[in-house]
Image (cartoon, rainbow, N blue to C red):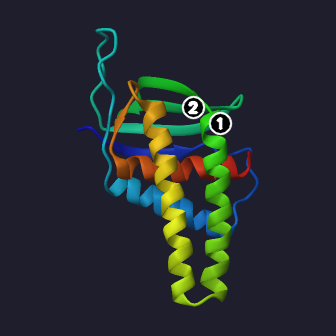
Amino acid sequence: MSRICHIELDDANLPPPTPEIEQERKVAMYDLIEQNSFALPLRDDRVVPEGPYRVGLAIREKRLVFDIRTEENAPAAEFHLSLSPFRQVVKDYWSICESYFDAVRNMPPSQIETIDMARRGIHNEGARVLAERLEGKAEIDNDTARRLFTLICVLHFGG
């Protein structure tokens, strides 16, 4: 069972999210649990606990922390990733999201579609960066990377 069965964000020290950000978070979490691919590869001949996995995401000491546990909550892995490779793409993503949220309220569908295409392109770039950063630590598919990237953006929002 190579999948995530539970996701938790450590957002205790973040400001309250806007309604739009809260919606992005809820959709990403729901979609992630409904369908994902997440596996821990063998490393240094160590036994790797089988999934499904409980995943905790947090930002601590300017690092992105993945706390991976078994379904029974036993520790399985933990990795700390530098936030530097994510900074620009997260900034670009929130910038285009603000434009998109404004367009949904005020513009015709043709203009919304153009902004949404740009938003998807930046989202894909963020997913690619995440997949690269997780290489050798976790095996994920593109849809899982996209949803996890959204959640990373939510954590970045206040950080």
At 52% from the left and 87% from the top, the residue drawn is 109
State the SS at label 1: strand
Q: Is residue 149 visible?
A: yes
Rendered-image quadrant of the N terminus: top left
Q: CA distance from mark 2 to mark 1?
A: 6 Å
Residue at (46, 47) in percent of width and height: 127
Image quadrant where residue 10 sits: top right
Label 2 close to label 1 by CB (< 8 Å): yes
Q: Residue furthest bottom?
A: 108
In this picture, residue 92 sits left or right of residue 123 = right
Residue 65: assigned label: 2
Query: Vertical placement of 122 versus 19: above or below?
Result: above
- Compare residues 3 and 138 and report the one nearer the observer: 138
Q: Is residue 2 left or right of residue 135?
A: left
Give the residue at x 53% y 76%.
114
- Tell me where residue 26 appears, x and y as whole percent: 51, 62
Q: Left or right: 154 with respect to 4?
A: right
Kind of residue at badge 2: Val
**From where the camera sits, is residue 155 visible?**
no
Q: Secondary structure at mark 2?
A: strand
| Residue indicated by mark 1 | 59
Residue 116 locus on image (x, y percent): 52, 71
Between residues 46 and 63, which one lies in front from this camera angle? 63
Residue 129: where, in percent of width, then height? Answer: 50, 40
